[in-house]
Amino acid sequence: MLMIGKYQFRTGLWPTLIAVLVFPCLIALGFWQLDRAKQKREMHNAFLERQQAEAIKLNERILSADPEELYWRHIELSGEFKRNRKIFLDNQVLNREAGYYVYVLFSPVGSDQSVLINYGWIAAGADRTLLPEVDLPNGTVTLKGIIKGVPSTGITLEETAVESIQNNIRVQSINIGKLSNLLNEKLALFVVRLEKESPYGLTRQWALPGSDEAMHLGYAFQWFALAATLLVIFIVVNLHKDKSNE
């Protein structure tokens, strides 16, 4: 028993166990969100720094380099679109409308590797057995885009990971290794996101990387506030006025 002025601090076993277990979890979640905010800030700073660098031209050295060293760099590549199969990344929402990010294979001039191009977003139709029509330009073209890592968005379910529809592919996540085997293609270990100014492509409303730092800071504040609230409630509920001296 602890005396605080005219009050006794007295608690039972279960309230103490609950507080001891829940309070550290709330604090840990708060620090986790702070760490996520830090990661987003570093990502955003790296993006801004690499955006200032001169655009690079695709060549074999670039294709064999560590892809992480190239992320967010502007790139220019010439070649042809492979029109045989397109990859539709499912469950992509834009302006509250469900749709797909469409990835297409691009064969750079003078290379035996293909590059996955994020061609943009397209709305999904009501009929899940059909995929939207996507037209690609013929012949040799020059593209300008930004090098990105393989997207981590999407739901990975082994039994529904790949669906073949109309000679195209619908996937829940992008896996370079699986796609390379499925398409019998040697794929680069990065993707290229078409720039908004490109004359080719679908709808492109790209979010800035790390732009959701404030969201994680807000979540961190909520977790810390819940921890503080729990602590205050625990103290108030277990304070009892000492009536022994009355």
Image (cartoon, rainbow, N blue to C red):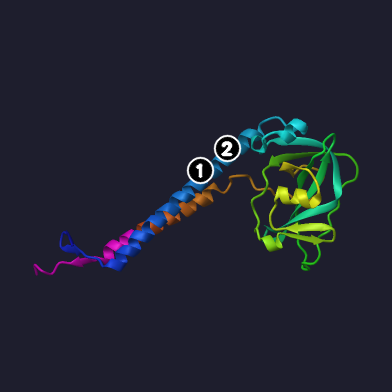
Q: In this view, which residue lies farthest toward the left?
A: 245
- Secondary structure type for disc 1: helix
Q: How crowded is mark 2: few (under 14 residues within 10 Å), some or many (20 or more)?
A: some
Q: Does residue 230 lie above or below 59 as drawn?
A: below
Q: Does the magenta stretch include residue 244?
A: yes
Disc on res. 45? 2
Instruction: Calculate the distance from the C-alpha at mark 2 to the C-alpha at mark 1.
Output: 11 Å
At which x and y percent is residue 44?
A: 59, 41
Camera-side residue of 166 and 123: 166
Camera-side residue of 201 and 191: 191
At which x and y percent is residue 161?
A: 70, 59
Q: In which quarter of the image is the C terminus?
A: bottom left
- The numbered mark, 2 or 1, whose residue comes first in the sequence reads 1
**Residue at horizontal 47%, vertical 47%?**
34
Q: Would you identify the image quadrant in which residue 17 lies? A: bottom left
Q: Would you identify the image quadrant in which residue 240 lies? A: bottom left
Label count reads 2
Q: Does residue 57 lie above or below 226 as drawn?
A: above
Q: Are marks 2 and 1 in contact (CB under 8 Å)?
A: no
Magenta part of the protein: which range?
Answer: 231-246
At which x and y percent is residue 96?
A: 67, 61
**Residue at horizontal 62%, vertical 44%?**
209
Disc on res. 18? none
- Secondary structure type for disc 2: helix
Task: Tell me if 206 is positioned left or right of 245 in this view.
Answer: right
Residue assigned mark 1: 38
At which x and y percent is residue 86?
A: 81, 53
Q: What residue type is labelled 2?
A: Asn
Residue 203 appears in the picture as rendered:
no
Q: Which amino acid does label 1 sit on?
A: Lys
Q: Is residue 232 magenta?
A: yes
